[in-house]
Amino acid sequence: MTFVDPEGEYPGDIWPGLPKRKPEQFKVQLKAFVPEITTAETAAAWRDAKRREKELYPKDLRPSNLLPKTGVNISFSSTGLAALGKFVLDEKNVKKDKQMAARFKQLQLRGGLFSIGMYTDLVYEGWDDPRDLREAYKPYGENKERLIDGVILVTSNIEQDMVEKVNRVKEHFLKESDIDEDTYVLSNDPVVEFPLVRVGSTRPGGKEHFGFKDGISQPKIEGLDDLPKDKEPKAVKPGMIFSGYEGDEMGQPDWATDGSFMVIRDLQQLVPEFDKFLEDNTHKTPFAASSKCDPKEKLAAYLMGRWKNGTPVDMSPHDDKEGECEYHGSNNFDFHPIDKHDKCPFGAHIRKMRPRGDLNHDHAVIIRRGISYGSDVTPEEQAARKSSDQHERGLIFVCYQSDIRMGYSFLTTRWASNNHFPDKKTKYVGEHGPGLDAVVGQRLSHHPPRSLGLPDGNEPSESRIELDNWVIHRGGEYFFSPSIKALQEYLTGPHDYPELQKRT
């Protein structure tokens, strides 16, 4: 159960826990809260308004915050749904009863990783080191219960609007419920708790703390987005993101239609250490000396697959095209020819996470959202070339998909953390393979050291650079974000298994 305080400049997040002791009271408050939640129709209208704004005004003359946009959304972990009587964590309790088994088959949300949660998934598999995780993400107590049952996301492009909305959320769920609407008295026993504080804010130029332009290259969805052009990746089926549509192979219950699984991942970024690595290793970077840009920026571009302004390395290997905006954030590339290691490294972050021409189709796709947290690097940290414990910074990564196992989990464990993905590249990059994703790749104890093959003009390429670890995985959780209809009806309805309630 976590709370994100409204101290950020723009977007913030509230992560509340649902009460296992008073679920029926929470359902009443949740149903009354539904009108506050932002619909897809509203979000689409904001997107269209922003597009028109860009068309009407040059970037340097564009009015700021032309359209106020404050959004709210709510999602639940499996323990949260179980608290509401809408999910079964121990299936054997219901499968031995015919009537409950029939309800289970009809109503249970599918997804093994969602059921067990991120801690059990990634710690027990060996990817996450429990020593790195924040306490709120760890099981607690003798029974090792998961602490986070739900998340309410609050975002805004105007700070005061965000503060007011966060206060509205807190008031709704923390006040005494048996008094009139206009009176706000803090309950001594509220239906939710907010023990963890997280603060997020957008950074200048839409860049994350390492300095790269963030949030670009999102998949286009058939029927919702404009058709891809030229070498852009093919549009994906809507069911790869939303439950109940073509492309969704999970066979979810009817109430889950229009919903999506959400992953939140807390990533700490060691910015001074990253900058030091770039400075110390430019001499190992092929073509850095002859690049039109700062040599260390050439190495950074190799690691990411894009220059910091968003220009793809595949389109411009030796120049960031700073004065040519049409390159910044462009998706008009496909890594062809895929049998040559001469432009974008096979193991670059964007190539690992979306291989484009290296595969014939996208079978692992996510919609990415997220927000940076923490202050800029201080002069003292710059001088020491080391991050301070008093000035933590990073990214609250958020993504959506219809199947966590074939979305976030597959991308991070089977692609980003696999030294030999993209496949069949040994002939062009050597026996050690493309290497690890330098940004989000994780290494199991029995894996080879972190490294990345770089294009150097040879075949196979001979240049290989050892990688440090500049992203600390602090934990997170798996959630399901339901439709407005599901919130109004099914999720605020009676317990699915009243027989189990009688036993407790």
Image (cartoon, rainbow, N blue to C red):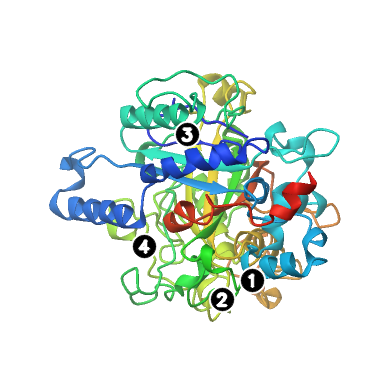
Please say whether residue 451 is visible from this viewpoint. Answer: no
Between the residue at mark 1 and the residue at mark 3, the CA separation in whole angstroms equals 33 Å
Residue 469 circle label:
none
Sooner in the amino-acid sequence: mark 2 or mark 4: 4
Pick the quarter of the image with the N terminus. top right
In contact (CB < 8 Å): disc 4 and disc 1: no
The crowd level at tag 4 (other Cα within 10 Å; few <14, some 14-19, many 20+) is some
Name the kind of residue labelled 3 in the image. Gly
Q: What residue would you read off at disc 2? A: 358
Q: What residue would you read off at disc 1? A: 422
Sooner in the amino-acid sequence: mark 3 or mark 2: 3
Sooner in the amino-acid sequence: mark 1 or mark 3: 3
Element at badge 1?
A: loop
In contact (CB < 8 Å): disc 1 and disc 2: yes
Between the residue at mark 4 and the residue at mark 1, the CA separation in whole angstroms equals 22 Å
Between the residue at mark 2 and the residue at mark 4, the CA separation in whole angstroms equals 18 Å
Element at badge 3?
A: loop
Sooner in the amino-acid sequence: mark 4 or mark 3: 3
Name the kind of residue labelled 4 in the image. Ser
Q: Position of residue 130 (x, y in %)?
A: 78, 40
Front position among marks 4 and 3: 3
Sooner in the amino-acid sequence: mark 4 or mark 1: 4
Q: Is residue 193 above or below residue 459?
A: above
Residue 330 circle label:
4
Element at badge 4?
A: loop
In contact (CB < 8 Å): disc 4 and disc 3: no
Pick the quarter of the image with the C terminus. top right
